[in-house]
């Protein structure tokens, strides 16, 4: 495997955000996405995300860019038209597969946040949580439970513990925040404890668009 880019943004690190490619029904979802992007920029963080210009994904990226943050998008080449690739990012990686997308997002990020989203958001977030369970990394994983969007998911996780498919101790791998400010505060409290082991580094075979 080749080494991934090792450069860091001028601030404290990068946060990967998983979220929907639609804006959802409630205006609160879009408002929280914009707030998260602005607060990431305001805190000196860079943003890593799925690389599109639509939905909560695009809103988060646009807000972070407007605040002066480094924003890195990672998008499979096959999806660049269907998901409308964002052409105004600091850097856009076009990769060969969803697997490469997720591995590169993980390698470039110091923490992970999930806003409301659908199957893709859940897939990406719980894969990274599973990596934490397997001790592949120790980076923070935070759900922002905007307006109770994830209430039923959290009930399911409690049910999974009750039915002995998830260990109670592993519930703490998923931190739950009411809003962006609480999520970022929790991540910042973790300091430099998070680290990703080299074994999960992705191949750096993606094309680059932008500066």
Image (cartoon, rainbow, N blue to C red):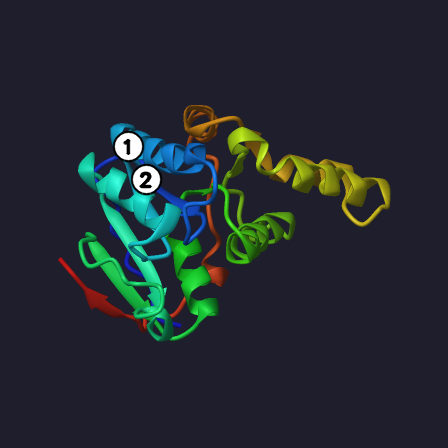
Q: Are marks 1 and 2 in contact (CB under 8 Å)?
A: no
* Total numbered labels: 2
Specify the quadrant of the image occupied by residue 188: top left
Where in the figure is residue 147, as x and y percent of width and height?
53, 30
Q: Earlier in the sequence, mark 1 or mark 2?
A: 2
Please report the residue visible at 30 percent of the width from the left and 69 percent of the height from the top. Answer: 94
Please report the residue visible at 54 percent of the width from the left and 50 percent of the height from the top. Answer: 125
Residue located beneath label 2 in the image: 13
Quarter of the image with the C terminus is bottom left
Label 1: how many residues lie within 10 Å, few (<14), some (14-19) or many (20+)? many
| Residue at far front of view | 25
Where in the figure is residue 40, as x and y percent of width and height?
32, 34
Label 1 – label 2 distance at C-alpha = 15 Å
Q: Is residue 107 visible?
A: yes
Residue 126 lies left or right of residue 66; in this view the side is right
In this picture, is 2 found above or below 86? Answer: below
Where in the figure is residue 50, as x and y percent of width and height?
37, 56
Of 188 and 76, the residue lying toward us: 76
Quarter of the image with the N terminus is bottom left
Residue 90 lies left or right of residue 174; in this view the side is left
Where in the figure is residue 51, as x and y percent of width and height?
32, 57
In this picture, is 78 found above or below 199? Answer: below
| Label 2: element kind | strand
As drawn, the label of residue 38 is 1
Label 2: how many residues lie within 10 Å, few (<14), some (14-19) or many (20+)? some
């Amino acid at each position: 495997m080749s080494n991934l880019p090792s450069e860091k943004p001028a601030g404290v690190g990068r946060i990967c955000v998983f979220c929907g490619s639609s804006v959802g029904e409630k205006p609160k979802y879009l408002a929280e996405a914009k707030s998260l992007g602005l607060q990431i920029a305001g805190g000196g963080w860079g943003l890593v995300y799925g690389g599109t210009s639509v939905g909560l994904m695009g809103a988060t990226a646009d807000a972070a860019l407007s605040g002066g943050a480094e924003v890195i998008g990672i998008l499979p080449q096959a999806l660049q038209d269907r998901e409308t690739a964002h052409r105004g990012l600091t850097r856009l990686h076009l990769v060969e597969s969803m697997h490469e997308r997720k591995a590169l997002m993980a390698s470039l990020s110091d923490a992970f946040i999930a806003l409301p989203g659908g199957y893709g958001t859940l897939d990406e977030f719980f894969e990274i949580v599973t990596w934490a369970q397997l001790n592949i990394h120790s980076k923070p994983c935070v759900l922002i439970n905007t307006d109770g969007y994830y209430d039923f998911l959290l009930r399911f996780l409690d049910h999974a513990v009750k039915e002995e498919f998830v260990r109670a101790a592993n519930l703490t791998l998923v931190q739950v925040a009411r809003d962006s400010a609480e999520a970022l505060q929790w991540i910042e409290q973790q300091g430099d404890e998070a680290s990703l082991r080299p074994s999960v580094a992705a191949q750096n075979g993606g094309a680059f668009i932008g500066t």
